Image (cartoon, rainbow, N blue to C red):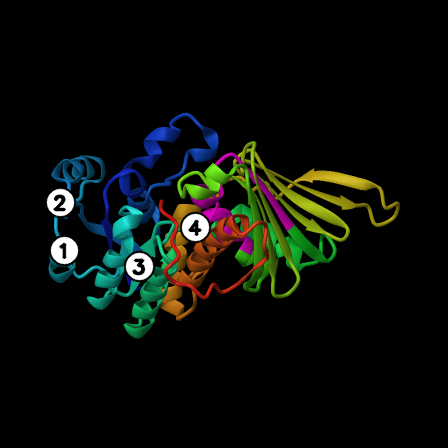
Amino acid sequence: MTTYRGAVIGCGRIGSTIDDEHVGQPQFRYPWAHAPAIIEAKGVELVTASDLRKEQLEDFKRRWGVTALYTDYREMIAKEQPDIVSVSTRAKERAEVVIGVAEMGVKAIYATKPMCRSLAEADAMIDTCRKNDVLLAIACHKNWSPWFQACLQAIRNGEIGTFSSMVCNYGWSLSRGHSHTLALFRLFAGAPAKWVFGHMNSDEAAAGDNDLSGTGMILYENGIRGFLNTGGWLNIDFVGSDGWISARNEHADFEMWTRLPETREPVRRQFPNPKRPRSSQQAAIEGIVENLNEGTEPLCPGEYGREALEIAIGMRESHRRGGEKIELPLEDRRLMMLA
């Protein structure tokens, strides 16, 4: 069995230290930053890292015992020849780094969200990875979550009837917080988005890329609908013709509503309630290992990350145009969302 060589580019919060924030929270007792997820994942070994800041590299060395550290990611790849590279830089640099890494011949790139700032950058990232036969996965890791995978399987099994829509309420802005949600919606919809419209909480919110708060709707090509609203904790409902599945409290609690076959009485039950799940971040890394071994596509490929960006931009443009329905894909690839 092949053991792949893993690397991290960007040794800050997402790449290395995010787990510090979740000490004492039961739902976060598994690795969430990229470095510990790679360490815990089967089939890959964390061997090297790169960051422009030497103090971050020293902290990375202390935390994870990695000694092959570089301030130049190109030098790192040339000398260490990693197979799977996590890219957790700022969004401003992400497209340039992903394209540079892909051109150097790695096998897979796991880039944090949002994948970049502009649609043109997203197109270039996807095209470069395709041209160089590099697997590109976006770290919207809820797509790999054992909980959400169980929800998806239950829907495919018809346990809530005919699947029709997804509803998400979230306290973060549509632009910053919903990359995970939109990639998850794409996975559950099973088809690309066809059109969107959006209404922001204020014209000032629509004018500022960093606080795009409001409400939006997505229609997917197969008729599935998605609804987003800013407010509350992260709650998602997957709605069918005869029941629904709810993910509550930052996806710490799940439940399913169905009916008893004999009496049609409504029944609520905990779902799927796995006893010892992996973190979805670890599951994503192990999924990429499986993709490389089997020649399959990741559960959140670059196209899903691009669509998440495109939907957020489309909702903003809808508001700016007075609530106009925005057809996808957007023609103007220069449009961007500043993160």
Please tell me the numbered disc located at residue 67.
2
Alpha carbons under labels 3 and 2: distance apart? 21 Å
Labels 2 & 4 near each other (Cβ < 8 A): no
| Magenta part of the chain | 166-185
Q: Residue at x 70, y 46 (%)?
A: 244
- The kind of residue tagged 2 is Thr
Q: Nearer the viewer, residue 161 or 31?
A: 161
Viewer-proximal residue among 73 and 179: 179
Of label 1 and label 2, which has the lower sequence position?
Answer: 2
- In the picture of the structure, the residue carrying the numbered disc 4 is 140
- Write the residue at 29% across / 38% down: 13
| Residue 101 in picture, x, y percent from top left | 22, 61
Residue 272 percent coordinates (x, y)? 61, 44
Q: How far apart in space, not on screen, are marks 1 and 2 (Cα)?
A: 12 Å
Distance between mark 1 and mark 4 Cα atoms: 25 Å
**Residue 85, percent from left and from top:** 26, 56
Residue corresponding to mark 1: 76
